Amino acid sequence: MQYLPNILFAVILLAGIGFFIKNVKKLSRNIKLGRDIDVSDNKSQRWKNMAMIALGQSKMVRRPIAGFLHAIVYVGFIIINIEVLEIIIDGLTGRHRIFSSIGSLYGILIGSFEILALLVFVSVTLFWIRRNVIRLKRFWKSEMTSWPKNDANNILYFEMVLMTLFIVMNATDVHFQDMNSGNVISQFIAPWFSSLPDSTLHIIERGAWWVHIIGILVFLNYLYYSKHLHILLAFPNTYYGKLKPKGQLDNLEAVTKEVKMMMDPNVDPFAAPEEEEAEGDIPAKFGASDVQDLNWLQLLNAYTCTECGRCTSACPANLTGKKLSPRKIMMDTRDRLEEVGKNIDANNGEFKEDGKQLLDDYISREELWACTTCNACVEECPVSIDPLSIILDMRRYLVMEQSAAPVELNNMMTNIENNGAPWPYNQMDRLNWKDE
Amino acid sequence: MSELLKVPTMAEFMAQGKTPEVLFWVGSAGSFDDRAKKITKAFVKLLNKANVEFAVLGTEESCTGDIAKRAGNEFLFQMQAVTNIEVLNAYDVKKIVTCDPHSFNCLKNEYPGLGGNYQVMHHTQFIKALLDEGRLSIGDDKFKGKRITFHDPCYLGRANNEYDAPREILKQTKANIVEMKRHKHTALCCGAGGAQMFKEPEKGDMDINVLRTNDALETNPNIIATGCPYCNTMMTDGIKAKEKEADVSVMDIAELIANDQGL
C-alpha cells in the first residue's frame, strides 16, 4: 500500500503526457493538410532567427512594457520547470526534494525559483489589469469574442494559481523552512500558517504539491485548445519564417508554366499533356478558398498566433475602421482548420464535404480587398507570422478562379492588358512627358 | 524648359552601338500621371546635371505588373513580367533605377524568378550614390532650417529595408528633419498600396491618407518629403482635405534636390 501514491502519480503523469501526445499528433496532421512548400534553404539564417526572435524575444521588446513583463513570465516559465523535474522524480520514487542533497546550490536554485514565481505572479496580474481594467484597445477588437477573451484570462489565472501553489507548497514544508535556505519568499508566507499543527501543515503541503503538478499537466493539455500554443510553436514558426525581403511575394509556379507555354512559339497548342503533368502536377485551383489550398507554413502560422493583436493595431485598414484585421485572418484560418480536422476525425480519416469554406464563411471579401499589402502586420508579429500571404492567396482565388475583383480593379487590369498601363493611355504615348 | 531635357532611349543607344550606365525605369505613373511626371522630370534634370549616361525604354516600356499581382492576378503579372524581361534582356540591361518603390520592389525581387536579373536601385539610393561620388553636390542652403518630415514608402522601407538613403540626402540639405511618431519600420501606409490606388476604399470611419497626413502634420512640417509617386498623390490629397496647401507642400526627394540645384 505504501507505493499507492507513486503508482497514482505515474498513472496521472502518463495520462497527462499521453493525451498531450495525442493532441500533438492531431496538430501535426492538421498542419500537413496544407500544400507543400520548400523551406529547406539557408539553415544557418533560420537557426539565427529562431534564436533571436523566439528564444531572444527580440521583437517582443519593441513594445517595452509588454515586452519586459513577457520576458519575466517567459524566463520564469523555463527556469521554474527545473523544479517540475524534481517533482516528477519525487513523485515516481516517493522521495522528498531529491535535489536537496546537492547542498547549498539547492537553496540558491529554489530561492531563485521563488523570486521568479513572485515576479511572474506580479507580471501576470499586470497583464490581467491591462486586459480587463485598462482594456487596451487591441484586446477588445470585434474578433475578440467571448472564447478568445476567456482563453486569455484562463491562461493568466492558471499562472497565478500555479505560482501560488508553488509558494504555498514551500511555505508549509516544515522541513524546508527549517533548512532556512532558499525560502526567500516563502519565509514571509510561512508565519500565516504557523498556528496550524504540523500534521495539518503536512496535508496542506501535500495538497499544494499534488494540485501543482496536476495543474501543470492540465495546463499542458490546455495548450492545444488555446492561443497559448505559441509557447511551443513560436520556435518552428520563427525557424520557417520568411527570409526573403518582405516585399517579395512568391511567383506562382503553375502560372509560370502556363505563361511560358503561351509565350513560346514552338509549343504545339494541340499537344496532349505530358504524363507527369496529367498526374496532377498543376494544382486543382489557383489561390486559396479553403485551408487545404494554403501551404502548411500558413497553417502553422495560424496555430502559432497568440492573438496579441499587434498586427491589427498597426494595420492601416483596421486603424481607419475597415473590417480587415490581420489577427482575425489568422484566427479564422485556425478555426476553419480545426473544423476540417474534426470533420476528418468524425468521418474515419476522410474529409466529408461540409458546404463550408474559409472564404465567405469565415473571411469576407470586404476584408480581403481592404488590404494595402503594406506589410505592417508582418513587421509587427513577434513570432514571424505572415497574414499577408493568406490575404494574397485568397485574392488570387477571387481573381483567377472567380473573376470576382471589384469592378474598378477589373478596369485597371483590362487597361494593363490592352495598353500596358493601369490607365487607358496608349503605350505609344509613354514618352510624351519628355516634351510636355 | 523642355528642350533642356536629354532623354535618350535604349533604341537610340543601341543604334549608336553604345550601352548606357543605367536604365531609367519610368513606370506607368511616372509616364502618365500629371503629378508623377513632375517627379520624373526632376529626376531626369538631376541625371542630366550629374552627366549620367542613362536611357529609357520609352514606348517599349510596359507596366511591371506589380499592381496586378497584388490584386491577385498572377497571370497578368507574369505576362507583363515575361514581356518586359524579354525587352530588358534583349538590350542586355544590367542596372536599373526607378522613382517608384513598387516597380523597384517588383523588378528587384520578383523578376529574377522569371529570368530577369538586374541590379535595381531606387532613385533615392541612386541620388545618394551620386552625392557620395561627388557627381552631384548640394551647395545651396535653400532648405536650411526648413522643417521636413519624410514619409517612408512601404515598398522601400518595410518591404526592402531602405530607410537611410532618403534621410541621408535630406540631411545634406541642412533641413531640420522631423520624424513622425510612426516612422521607419512602424511607418503607416499612405493607403495606396495593394492596388488600393485604383479603387474606392472599403467602408470605414476615415481614409488612410488622412490618418497619415495627421501623423505628418503633428510634426509641424514645411515640407512632407516622399519617395513614391503614389504616396505623393495620397499625401497631397490629404493635405488638401486638411486645407493646408498654403502651409505645407508635398515633394519627392528628387524634386527637393532638383529645386535645391535651381533646376
Image (spheres, grey):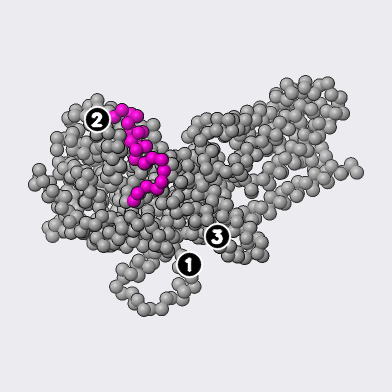
Can residue A243 be spotted in the picture? yes
Q: Which of marks 2 and 1 is in front?
A: 2
Can residue B166 be spotted in the picture? no
Q: Does the magenta stretch include residue A200?
A: no
Q: In this view, does A308 lie to the left or right of B202?
A: right
Q: Name the residue under label 3.
A: A356
Q: Distance between the residues labelled 1 and 3?
A: 18 Å
Q: Residue at x 27, y 32 (%)?
A: B244
Q: Tag on residue A284?
A: 1
The answer to whether tags 2 and 3 share a subunit is no
Label 3 neighbourhood size at 10 Å, few (<14), some (14-19), many (20+)?
few
Name the spot of residue A88 as percent of width and height, x first: 75, 41
Q: Is residue B208 magenta?
A: yes
The answer to whether tags 1 and 3 share a subunit is yes
User: Disc 3 on helix, strand or loop?
Assistant: loop
Q: Name the residue under label 2.
A: B247
Label 1 neighbourhood size at 10 Å, few (<14), some (14-19), many (20+)?
few
Please give the range of residues in magenta: B199-226
Of all residues, the one furthest to the right in this rendering is A1
The answer to whether tags 2 and 1 share a subunit is no
Of residues A243 and B32, the one nearer the viewer is B32
Which amino acid lies under the numbered mark 2 shown in the image of this protein? Asp
Q: How far apart are marks 2 and 1 (CA)?
A: 56 Å
Which amino acid lies under the numbered mark 1 shown in the image of this protein? Ala
Of residues A309 and A267, the one nearer the viewer is A309
Q: Which of marks 1 and 3 is in front?
A: 3
Name the spot of residue B92 as percent of width and height, x first: 24, 58
Which amino acid lies under the numbered mark 3 shown in the image of this protein? Lys
Q: Distance between the residues labelled 2 and 3?
A: 54 Å
Q: Which residue is drawn at 33% across and 74% down?
A: A267
Of residues A8 and A106, the one nearer the viewer is A8
